[in-house]
């Protein structure tokens, strides 16, 4: 297959250990520019992103500096997402199949499961965070339920369990209808959140008497520190999207053209993320005027509204927003990742069901309530993503020049991606070198000053190591071939 072609063929005689209909190259490509924009809106428009964007205030940057850093970061994310996204569009395959190119047809399970493992925890955590809003609505409608808060099971109150399982089942219904229904659900989620953000901006502007100054910061630092924090903010934006950058091909595989993919990524990232970030920064700056301190959690902000109707509507909107980001960022990927592990027995829906069940087993409310677990465990796993991204991108664009034999991605014991028993040892050597550096940077406190840069450092070092290994192999093969002549 040429580097500029879109695969439109069919796979013949694939291995049952590597193929099912959900992992096969996409046949129907209905995801338009708006569909991809909506996917990004669902990923961006969440309580987590709002809190993240507003929380950059506390790096010591002014609102303007935060906004500029976020715009630069968004363009960088778009460029990186285009790399994996375009590959997904051309080949029509999801992330775990894409990873087979560089890690081997069976070795691809390793990066897939690392990504899937992270998603399971975040799927549970996001479901739990959204369930808090459900509980708030229940307590408002049924005040007598407050007496049930004292009854707990496995660390979660009875109303907490009701809220969590309600959201869990609601998301189950959405993903059970498959990717096409998820596309339609995303098309609805993003615009609804914008309406809520507009209402928040109007409300805070009225409360502040129009006196909103985004040129201030609640934290005072020196000019030298501000420069460092500015670049840290850019790196944090990239790291924040590092998971979806890796598996965006799960969605762009349904795009009909490279142009559609790039347009969707442009509108969804620099344009949409900047607009949402601006709204978050403006509202947060307004809370400094109104309440004398920055409130970065939109749920806490809404709870300060005395109107019960507005409280319920706001909670419902943020529930919808969280469902959107959860399904896009934390469910689709592990569903494909588990399907890739055992294609003969697990399809997309079964993979999603396994993810949902495991998201309860890990008791996300316990993980979220423990900062050590969140920062060290999940942060440590995140340090694996940069090296994985580097290997996939260097291999696809620099080593193989985008010329991929799609048929061979589904063949066992033969083909160029079989390598050694289905594993590409050289890719794993580069991966190990990368994580030896990134994991300590992310976890050891003495490196906290550069922890924000662990993702790009991992990409750079692993990419150089992998490129050097593969280049030396190509030189050796060329020398051997010349000698044979």
Image (cartoon, helix red, strand yellow):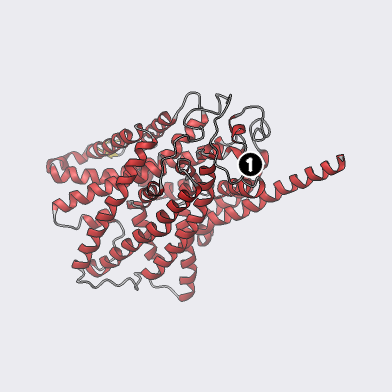
Q: How many marks?
A: 1
- Residue at coordinates 54% horizontally, 43% vertically from top-left? 90
Position of residue 386 relative to residue 276, above or below, is above
Q: Is residue 409 visible?
A: yes
Quarter of the figure with the N terminus: top right
- What kind of element bears circle 1? helix
Q: Position of residue 172 (x, y in %)?
A: 33, 34
Q: Position of residue 470 (x, y in %)?
A: 70, 46
Quarter of the figure with the C terminus: top right
- Residue at coordinates 14% horizontally, 57% vertically from top-left? 306
Q: Residues within 10 Å of mark 1 (few under 14, many from 20)?
A: some
> Could you say which is closer to the camera, residue 473 or residue 157?
473
> Could you say which is closer to the camera, residue 209 or residue 410?
410
> Could you say which is closer to the camera, residue 116 or residue 479?
479
Q: Quadrant of residue 215?
A: bottom left
Q: Which residue is mark 1?
A: 428
Q: Position of residue 333 (x, y in %)?
A: 45, 39
305 sits to left or right of 217: left
> Could you say which is closer to the camera, residue 15 or residue 289?
15
Residue farthest bottom in this picture? 223
Q: Position of residue 365 (x, y in %)?
A: 34, 42
278 sits to left or right of 290: right
Q: Is residue 376 visible?
A: no
């Amino acid at each position: 297959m040429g580097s500029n072609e879109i695969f439109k063929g069919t796979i013949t005689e694939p291995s049952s250990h590597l193929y099912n209909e959900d992992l096969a190259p996409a046949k129907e490509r209905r995801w338009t520019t708006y569909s991809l924009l909506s996917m990004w809106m669902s990923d961006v428009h969440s309580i987590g992103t709002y809190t993240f964007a507003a929380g950059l205030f506390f790096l010591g940057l002014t609102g303007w500096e935060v906004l500029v850093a976020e715009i630069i970061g968004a363009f960088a994310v778009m460029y990186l997402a285009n790399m994996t996204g375009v590959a997904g569009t051309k080949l029509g395959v999801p992330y775990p199949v894409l990873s087979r190119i560089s890690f081997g047809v069976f070795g691809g399970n390793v990066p897939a499961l690392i990504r899937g493992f992270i998603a399971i925890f975040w799927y549970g955590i996001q479901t739990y965070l959204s369930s808090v809003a459900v509980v708030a609505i229940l307590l408002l409608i049924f005040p007598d339920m407050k007496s049930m808060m004292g009854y707990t099971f496995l660390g979660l109150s009875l109303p907490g369990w009701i809220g969590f399982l309600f959201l869990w089942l609601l998301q189950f219904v959405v993903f059970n209808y498959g990717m096409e229904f998820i596309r339609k659900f995303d098309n609805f989620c993003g615009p609804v959140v914008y309406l809520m953000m507009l209402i928040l901006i109007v409300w805070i502007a009225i409360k502040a008497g129009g006196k909103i100054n985004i040129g201030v910061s609640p934290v005072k630092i020196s000019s030298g520190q501000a420069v460092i924090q500015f670049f840290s903010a850019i790196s944090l934006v990239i790291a924040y999207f590092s998971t979806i950058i890796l598996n965006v091909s799960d969605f762009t595989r349904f795009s009909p053209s490279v142009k559609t993919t790039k347009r969707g990524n442009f509108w969804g990232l620099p344009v949409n993320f900047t607009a949402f970030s601006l709204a978050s920064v403006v509202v947060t700056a307004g809370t400094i005027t109104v309440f004398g301190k920055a409130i970065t959690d939109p749920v806490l902000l809404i709870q300060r509204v005395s109107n019960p109707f507005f409280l319920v509507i706001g909670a419902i909107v943020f529930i919808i927003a969280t469902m959107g980001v959860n399904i896009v960022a934390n469910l689709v990927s592990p569903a494909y990742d588990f399907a890739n592990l055992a294609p003969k027995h697990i399809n997309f829906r079964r993979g999603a069901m396994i993810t949902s069940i495991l998201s309860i087993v890990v008791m996300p409310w316990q993980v979220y309530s423990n900062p050590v677990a969140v920062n060290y465990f999940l942060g440590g796993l995140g340090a694996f993503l940069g090296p994985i991204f580097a290997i996939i991108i260097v291999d696809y664009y620099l080593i193989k020049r985008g010329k991929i034999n799609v048929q061979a991605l589904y063949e066992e014991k033969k083909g160029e991606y079989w390598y050694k028993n289905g594993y590409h040892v050289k890719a794993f050597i580069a991966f190990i070198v990368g994580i030896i550096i990134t994991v300590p940077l992310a976890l050891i406190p003495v490196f906290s000053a550069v922890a924000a840069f662990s993702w790009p450092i991992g990409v750079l070092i692993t990419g150089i190591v992998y490129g050097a290994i593969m280049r030396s192999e190509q030189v050796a093969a060329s020398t051997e071939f010349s000698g044979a002549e």
